[in-house]
């Protein structure tokens, strides 16, 4: 199956970018000076200092709160303030703010998102979570971004881990983890109404109500909806209109200082337009038509955390997720039940020990709608049983720590998988950290690898010729050994720098093995078939670095930047005859990406912000370098 194509970002060439940034600063300075003269002790709008950004507690790296300074991983936090000032209206656009994250829009409702390479509409080496609930789709191994919608004003932060996170989160967290964390209902009291519209975002709206009682019980409910118009297509077909409605709630209850409870859920339905291409054995052999995908579902999550002492706490989380996804050429319904237990202990010597157990059961029902696309068997239940242990051992009065751990997982495709890691952290000062790590991570098979039966028309010579992709029950897990290092430091109170370097060794990556062509007479008419078997025929490496400086020359003006460089070198194994996967993977990843932001906070609650973005060409997708 061909991987979904990227689409270029809109080419908006911003000339004289440095002049824009300078004008922003001059405008802010003139207004600030005038206001200071007129108002004397006028206070600027409250902003988080760069030192406070480093003190933000994150949970994705270890499932327990820890400061960014004490996190031995390449982590980037997108705050609610960042989201608001970005002007983004969906998750993929927000993720463009993080270094090392590759985002390309395919059409109105499809995005390609990847971290450190291998971006695709369904990126199979990236784990995405919403409040700890995985939204990874087991059938196609990836994330349907168009089905992930939450009011952006309800997001507290988005934690982006670049690099493997499988030791904590398990398989498929190979190149990164994205954890979208919503606000506690204690922070969303009152009534909120928003509405908007335009020629593309034709109608958007959110209604939210939150309150509390005298017993520590807080809650919110919300409803949201939008209709997105089709984007421009040179062929004139306006196929990708998109409509969605969603509602949900969250309740938080602090029964006592020791216990906290969370219950939350969502229901949604969307209709998303698209272009479908599939094959038929009888003429016309290839059909291209526009049609709508109907996607609906709901989820319910419960979490209980008990703090037993200042040295011990545990957490139990369970969720149920129902999805129904029907495209014109196929459909699937899936129910997922997931239960996780996490225990945290502080051992003698101030060792920080975490261990946990998990089980996930996910039965899926595939519905065949055209004869040339099928998954056999139609019904299959994915089952994952897992456990992990991780111990952070401090040295030198807690300035140096060594974190050792491993995830052990059993799945119904390859049996047991082990994902160990070792991470070293040195806090030279309270606001300076050096870290390094070695990790093994795996991407376990999906039904796309083992069960697919896809026939695609190639051409007609004497006979019609078809490609036939067949899943391989002997397909085994893709493997990564990752070597990382980095540092983050507050150089001055107004200058923060975060740098990460990495070298990834991949083995057993997804590929096709081309077989000998043969003649097939049924179904009629007679036709030739070129078989393609899914295999693990690619290996290679990828290396690069990410740089994210942040500078506040004055209290009301902030300049941010992120630059990422990635070089991939993949090869077919000696026995593999895959004709195009290597070029497709390498050529679908930008080697250089640059983002520069200027954020000016003016008096009277006015703001003046600009963003400049450069993405290098994607030759495999025939996309030139873009500037926006």
Image (tube, rainbow, N blue to C red):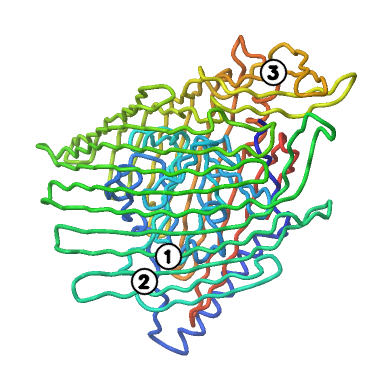
Q: Is residue 535 left or right of residue 417?
A: right
Mark sitting earlier along the chain (2/3): 2
Quadrant in the rendering for residue 492: bottom left
Give the mark toward the camera: 2 or 3.
3
Quadrant occupied by the C terminus: bottom right
Q: Is residue 388 positioned above or below 398 on the image?
A: above
Give the residue at x 50% y 23%: 506
Please name whichever residue, 501 or 141, is drawn nearer the observer in this view of the structure.
141
Give the residue at x 65% y 63%: 228
Give the residue at x 68% y 71%: 198
Decide: marks 2, 1 in contact (CB < 8 A)?
A: yes
Quadrant in the rendering for residue 80: bottom left
Residue under pointer 2: 188
> From mark 1 to mark 3, how far is it between C-alphas?
49 Å
> From mark 2 to mark 1, how far is it between C-alphas?
8 Å
Q: Residues within 10 Å of mark 1 (few under 14, many from 20)?
A: some
Give the residue at x 70% y 40%: 617
């Amino acid at each position: 199956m061909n991987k979904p194509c990227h689409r270029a970002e809109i080419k908006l060439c911003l000339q004289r970018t440095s002049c824009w940034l300078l004008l922003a600063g001059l405008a802010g300075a003139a207004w600030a000076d005038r206001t200071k003269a007129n108002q004397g002790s006028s206070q600027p709008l409250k902003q988080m200092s760069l030192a406070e950004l480093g003190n933000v507690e994150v949970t994705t790296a270890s499932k327990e709160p820890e400061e960014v300074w004490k996190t031995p991983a390449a982590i980037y936090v997108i705050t609610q303030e960042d989201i608001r000032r970005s002007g983004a209206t969906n998750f993929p656009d927000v993720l463009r703010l993080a270094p090392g994250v590759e985002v390309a829009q395919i059409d109105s409702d499809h995005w390609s998102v990847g971290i450190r390479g291998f971006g695709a509409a369904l990126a199979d080496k990236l784990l995405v979570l919403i409040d700890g609930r995985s939204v990874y789709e087991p059938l196609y191994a990836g994330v349907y971004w168009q089905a992930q919608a939450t009011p952006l004003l309800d997001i507290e932060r988005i934690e982006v881990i670049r690099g493997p996170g499988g030791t904590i989160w398990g398989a498929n967290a190979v190149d990164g983890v994205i954890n979208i964390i919503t606000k506690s209902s204690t922070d969303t009291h009152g009534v909120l109404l928003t509405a908007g519209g335009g020629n593309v975002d034709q109608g958007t709206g959110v209604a939210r109500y939150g309150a509390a009682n005298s017993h520590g019980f807080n809650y919110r409910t919300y409803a949201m909806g939008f209709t997105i118009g089709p984007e421009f297509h040179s062929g004139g077909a306006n196929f990708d209109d998109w409509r969605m409605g969603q509602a949900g709630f969250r309740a938080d209850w602090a029964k006592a200082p020791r216990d906290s409870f969370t219950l939350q859920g969502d229901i949604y339905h969307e209709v998303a337009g698209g272009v479908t291409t599939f094959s038929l054995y009888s003429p016309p052999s290839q059909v291209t038509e526009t049609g709508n995908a109907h996607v609906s579902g709901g989820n319910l999550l419960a979490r209980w955390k008990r703090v037993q002492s200042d040295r011990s706490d545990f957490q139990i989380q369970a969720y149920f997720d129902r999805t129904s996804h029907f495209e014109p050429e196929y459909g699937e319904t899936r129910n997922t039940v997931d239960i996780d237990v996490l225990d945290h202990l502080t051992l003698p010597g101030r060792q920080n020990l975490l261990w946990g157990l998990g089980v996930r059961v996910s039965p899926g029902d595939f519905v065949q709608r055209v004869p040339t696309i099928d998954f056999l068997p139609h019904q299959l239940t994915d089952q994952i049983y897992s456990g992990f242990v991780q111990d952070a051992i401090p040295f030198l009065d807690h300035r140096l720590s060594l974190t050792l751990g491993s995830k052990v997982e059993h799945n119904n495709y390859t049996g047991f998988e082990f994902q160990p890691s070792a991470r070293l952290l040195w806090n030279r000062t309270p606001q300076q950290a050096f870290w390094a790590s070695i990790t093994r991570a795996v991407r376990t098979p999906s039904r796309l690898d083992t069960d697919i039966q896809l026939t695609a028309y190639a051409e007609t010579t004497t006979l019609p010729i078809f490609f036939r992709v067949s899943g391989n029950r002997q397909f085994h897990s893709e493997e990564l050994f990752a070597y990382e290092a980095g540092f983050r430091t507050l150089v001055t109170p107004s200058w923060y720098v975060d740098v990460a370097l990495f070298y990834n060794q991949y083995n057993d990556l997804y590929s096709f093995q081309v077989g000998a062509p043969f003649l097939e007479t049924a179904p009629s008419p007679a036709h030739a078939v070129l078989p393609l078997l899914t295999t693990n025929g690619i290996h290679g490496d990828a290396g690069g670095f990410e740089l994210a400086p942040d500078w506040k020359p004055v209290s009301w003006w902030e300049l941010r930047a992120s630059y990422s460089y990635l070089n991939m070198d993949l090869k077919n194994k000696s026995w593999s005859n895959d004709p195009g996967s290597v070029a497709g993977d390498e050529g679908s990843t930008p080697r250089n990406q640059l983002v520069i932001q200027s954020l000016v906070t003016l008096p009277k609650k006015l703001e003046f912000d600009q963003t400049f973005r450069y993405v290098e060409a994607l030759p495999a997708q025939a996309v030139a370098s873009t500037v926006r």
